[in-house]
Image: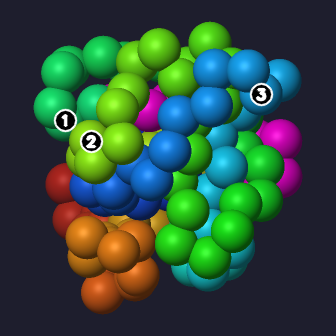
Amino acid sequence: MNISLLRTKIHRATVTGADLNYEGSVSICPDLIKASGLLMNERVDIYNCNNGARFSTYVIKGKKGEICLNGAAARHVQKGDLVIICSYCGLSMDEAKKHEPTVVFVNAKNKVTEKRKEDRKNNK
């Protein structure tokens, strides 16, 4: 049996744009993609801290400092909103007990302030 666990999270990133006429996706700063370990075209869930919206899209490379929601997802955010971006993975129960997701914290300009592995003490 596999279960779904958090793989990586970018915590409280600031939305820098919303482009309704773009094809779709979320454009994410290359530094944040690298720090979080996200992959191009990877599915992510986005949680808007300002309005409570929750939705899924996929990752594309953006410009430095950018978090831009594109296409239909642009309807769920406004410039300046804070969002949490998460990806998940399917793991066996044994793998889950050892799993430590990556969490990236950012400042208001979407620069990494801290990166850490989440504690797995409760997964025994």
Residue 113 disc label = none
Amino acid carrying label 2: it is Asp
Graded by Cα atoms within 10 Å as few (under 14), some (14 to 19) or many (20 or more), the crowding at tag 3 reads few
Q: Residue at x 26, y 76 (%)?
A: 107
State the CA–CA distance, disc 3 to disc 1.
23 Å
- Name the amino acid type tagged 3: Tyr
Is residue 26 on the magenta stretch? no
Q: Residue at x 28, y 48 (%)?
A: 80
Residue 91: image location, x then y, percent: 62, 40
Q: Which residues are magenta?
A: 39-47
Residue that mark 2 sits on? 81
| In this rendering, the label closer to the viewer, 3 or 1 | 3
Q: Amino acid at mark 1?
A: Cys
- Position of the C terminus by quadrant: bottom left
Residue 24 left/right relative to 86: right
Query: Which residue corresponds to mark 3?
Result: 22
Q: Residue at x 71, y 60 (%)?
A: 62
Sequence-first disc among 3 and 1: 3
Question: Can the viewer see residue 43 in this picture?
Answer: no
Residue 71 occupies quadrant: top right
Q: Are marks 1 and 2 in contact (CB under 8 Å)?
A: yes
**Residue 98 x %, y %:** 47, 62
User: In 3D space, how far apart are the residues under numbered discs 2 and 3 (Cα atoms)?
Assistant: 19 Å
Mark 1 or 2: in front is 2
